[in-house]
Image (cartoon, rainbow, N blue to C red):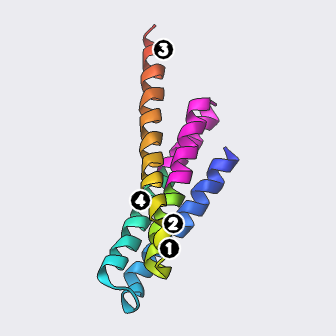
């Protein structure tokens, strides 16, 4: 659980910092498309920090390899997706754009594995 709480803290702190900066100062140095990239990155990062907190709580109650996969996908995905948008907006590193869909796919994979975990758990409770 501790590693997922660290992931929650890292993603939450970065998401809040970037969101606050996008709301209060970024417009002075960023064009509108870049500002929207920062806002999008912050939003996805914060939502996945909350989701990762839920995974940490589930792992505490019922340790599972599947939940570990979900946690990894959410943490890595949020960092890769949001981080690539931040780097693209702030320093113009266009080579990081390949990380954006990779991070998005990881987050989506986490949700799919969570659905499968829920279905298996639900099916097991019906027996």
The residue tagged 1 is 87
Mark 1 closeness class: few <14, some 14–19, many ≥20 residues within 10 Å: some
Give coordinates of residue 107: x percent, y percent. Answer: 45, 48
| Cα–Cα span, label 3 and label 4 | 32 Å
The answer to whether residue 24 is above or below residue 126 is below
The quadrant of the image that shows the N terminus is top right
Quadrant position of residue 28: bottom left
Viewer-side label of 3, 1: 1
Q: Earlier in the sequence, mark 3 or mark 4?
A: 4
Are the residues at dot 3 and dot 4 in contact (C-beta closer than 8 Å)? no
> Start and end of the magenta stretch?
51-77
Mark 2 vs mark 4, CA separation in Å: 11 Å
Query: Magenta stretch: dominant SS?
Result: helix
- For discs 2 and 4, the disc positioned in front in the rendered view: 2
Mark 3 and mark 2 lie on one chain; the one further toward the N terminus is 2
Camera-side mark, 1 or 4: 1
Checking the image for residue 44, the label placed there is 4
Query: Which residue occupies 43% across, 77% down?
Result: 89
Give the spatial CA distance, label 3 vs label 1.
44 Å
The answer to whether residue 81 is seen in the rendering is no
Question: Quick one: label 2 or label 4, which is nearer the N terminus?
Answer: 4
To which residue does mark 2 refer? 83
Residue 122 percent location from the top left of the image: 43, 20
**Circle 2 residues within 10 Å: few <14, some 14–19, many ≥20:** many
Q: 13 above or below 102?
A: below
Q: Mark on residue 55?
A: none
Q: Secondary structure at mark 4?
A: helix
The nearer-to-camera label among 3 and 2 is: 2
What is the secondary structure assignment of the residue under circle 1? helix
């Amino acid at each position: 659980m501790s590693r997922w709480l660290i992931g929650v803290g890292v993603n939450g702190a970065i998401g809040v910092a970037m969101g606050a900066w996008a709301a209060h100062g970024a417009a002075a140095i960023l064009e509108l498309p870049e500002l929207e990239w920062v806002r999008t990155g912050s939003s996805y990062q914060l939502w996945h920090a909350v989701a990762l907190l839920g995974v940490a709580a589930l792992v505490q109650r019922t340790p599972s390899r599947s939940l570990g996969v979900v946690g990894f996908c959410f943490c890595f995905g949020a960092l890769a997706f949001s981080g690539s948008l931040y780097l693209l907006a702030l320093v113009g590193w266009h080579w990081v754009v390949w990380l954006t869909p990779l991070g998005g796919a990881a987050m989506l994979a986490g949700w799919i594995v969570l659905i499968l975990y829920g279905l298996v758990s639900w099916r097991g409770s019906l027996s």
